Amino acid sequence: MRVVFLAWRDLAHPNAGGSEVVVDRLIEGLRARGHDAELVCGGPVDDRPYPVTRNGGTYSQYLKAPLTARAVRDADLIVDVVNGMPYFTPLWWKGPRLCLVHHVHGKQWQHYFPGPVAGVGSFIEGRLMPRAYRNTDIIAISDSTRTSLQDIGFRAEQIHLMHSGLDDELFDTPVPEAAEPLFLAFGRLAPNKGFDRLLDIWEQVRRETGGRLVIAGDGPERERLLARAGAGVEFTGRVSEERKRELLGSAWLMVHTAHQEGWGLVIMEAAASQTPAVAFDVVGVRDAIVDGVTGVLASDADAFAREWVTLTEETERRRRLGTQARARACEFTWDATIDAFLKAAVAAGADVEVTPRRGGPLRTTSAASTAADDRSAVPPTTTEADSAPTGRTVTDPDSLPRGLARSAQLFRLFRREPTDPDTFYRFLAADTVRQLRDFGPLAGAHAVDIGGGPGYFADALRAQAGSCFVVEYDFDELHLHGRTPDRAVQGDGQELPLASGSVDLVHSSNVLEHVPAPLSMLSEMARVIKPSRGLGYLTFTNWYSPWGGHETSPWHYLGGERAADRFERTTGARPKNEFGTSLHPLHIAEVMRWFEARDDIEVLWAGPRYWPAWAKTIIQVPGVREVVTWNLVVIFRRHEHNPTFPARTGVARDAMSRSERQHSEPKQR
């Protein structure tokens, strides 16, 4: 497929920013997958590893675009990159096209242009563009941008969401914090970035915080800002990528005062370096920061100053936010960005096959101890996913047997699991996908797999055009069976490093019985699901099941400790699933009572995992279900009955302190 991007600037432009970075990564990513992608833009331009055609100056390029683009008339797809002013490709290009929008400028026109000119720009963006592009597929860079586009007249069904990725180099072992307070602001020195507000707030806080405020970047406002900056402010100008990573890592806080953004790319880059941010609660920025989890959103300048001072003083809280910020940043890869772009291209009519890309470094972060004192404790990201010696085969869900034949196959593979785990877990993952498809489409679903280990379910979901990352407590579990998931976070299922309502699907297979506080984990699973449309998929092995004691079965019927001691006498080693430490007795009645107590949760299906679907009535029979079910499946949805859904706790959450949970070392797999 040949793709031509029509964009305002090349990266060589002195005012290049996040929009230019995204286009550059898209072109390079497409070319890496065998597509022919190139850039047509206004000057100045520079040599790139792909073709770049200069298309006039800042304003003349909009008039010249139809002529320049027709010079590459054999393009299979044209991407109209809108930075306030569109190229109006629907008027002159009848082939497949996409419109990529970073943010709707709205009132920002007034910051850049005199009144009459700003009025014309605002009219074109807000009135003409929605009409001209009514039959064009639109890519929005964030949820905020998608909402803003709908506000000016675009239909929800024509908008595709594509988050920006983050460079893998940002996930190298984080640079330690500077010894003295260092606060970083990064961006183009332009009116919309709010650096005047930043300097005013700095004057309020510097006597309490001490340290330095470093402002990295260049732009038309530099000389004026230099003239009004007070003590302790350092302007670096444009910096190299190496220096940028050093600043991002050593900063105590990222302080961001933009009036609005399309997507706070620099905030996410700081997050990848384990540096939390303080910013205003504005469009685009609120997509990059999960308030109170990965940073803080302030309503006004006074609140901004208070949080700045507080986070400077509260080291443990600051580092906890940084750890959680890095955990969330692991989700955003350029491969996922390319996948989303190609899906939009298909919707636009481009003849291209969407094959999710696997490979690249495994991104990990330690979220199990969110109050860690040392950033160097975060594991380095060096494991290559494609190095798995047995490959990354995915079982086709439609090829699986049904009914009693399915049950017989499951039990047969289960018995062979010790010697052939790959076949068993691929079958389970495919079977799960087939079951979930009955409750809604999986294409485009963003999922988290708790205790997903080497990523069998994540691979199966990606084969359905969804995306998934793994939260795994035990780092070694990420490398089982010669596999490694593409995207993973080391974390605790009882305290997920995720924002409330942030995923379409939460999946957990045979983990609940391995955590000491199972109701806490259930609350966390419910917390992170998007209300109304998100799904939860839970399976666990109940204690009185024939396999309730796992490798110590069936002797667990005589007591868990006795069964573990017998296992040691017989084999000479303690069981991997140690009773009371990494294996805990869990009963169906206990779990179903939890679901019944939650008026904001609807159970869509519940029944034995290994038996045919018609056997689900077993779980209605107390006592019998605890033995016969073997392994319970619960598929559920959370509704918006409780708008003040708790950030970290839920109904019937176990009374267990964080330190108790950490020292109990649950085994998730």
Image (spheres, grey):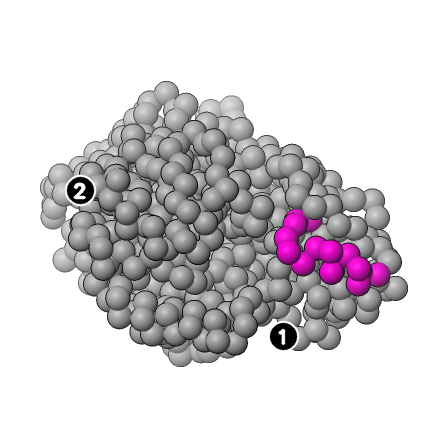
In the rendered structure, find residue 496 and report the number of the disc placed on it: none
Q: Is residue 218 magenta?
A: yes
Residue 102 location in percent, x, y? 43, 58
Which quadrant of the structure image shows residue 130? Answer: bottom left
Q: Nearer the viewer, mark 1 or mark 2?
A: 2
- Mark 2 surroundings within 10 Å by alpha-carbon count, few (fewer than 14), some (14 through 19), many (20 or more): few
Range of residues picked out in magenta: 216-230
Q: Residue at x 34, y 74 (%)?
A: 127
User: Relative to residue 516, is residue 156 drawn left or right?
Assistant: left
Question: For the residue marked with disc 2, what is the amino acid?
Answer: Asp
Q: How many marks?
A: 2
Residue 193 location in percent, x, y? 61, 62
Residue 233 seen from this side: yes
Question: For the residue marked with disc 1, what is the amino acid?
Answer: Ser
Residue 460 seen from this side: no
Residue 119 location in percent, x, y? 45, 75
Q: Tell which circle, 1 or 2, labels the residue nearer the N-terminal end.
A: 1
Q: Residue at x 47, y 53 (%)?
A: 58
> Which residue, as the protein is rendered here, is positioned at the far top?
389
Read off the residue under disc 2.
351
Q: Residue at x 52, y 36 (%)?
A: 168
Read off the residue under disc 1.
299
Q: Residue at x 32, y 25 (%)?
A: 391
Residue 634 location in percent, x, y? 31, 59
Name the image quarter holding the N terminus.
top left
Q: Is residue 504 magenta?
A: no
Determine whether the residue tagged by mark 2 lies in a helix, strand or loop.
loop
Determine whether the residue tagged by mark 1 lies in a helix, strand or loop.
loop
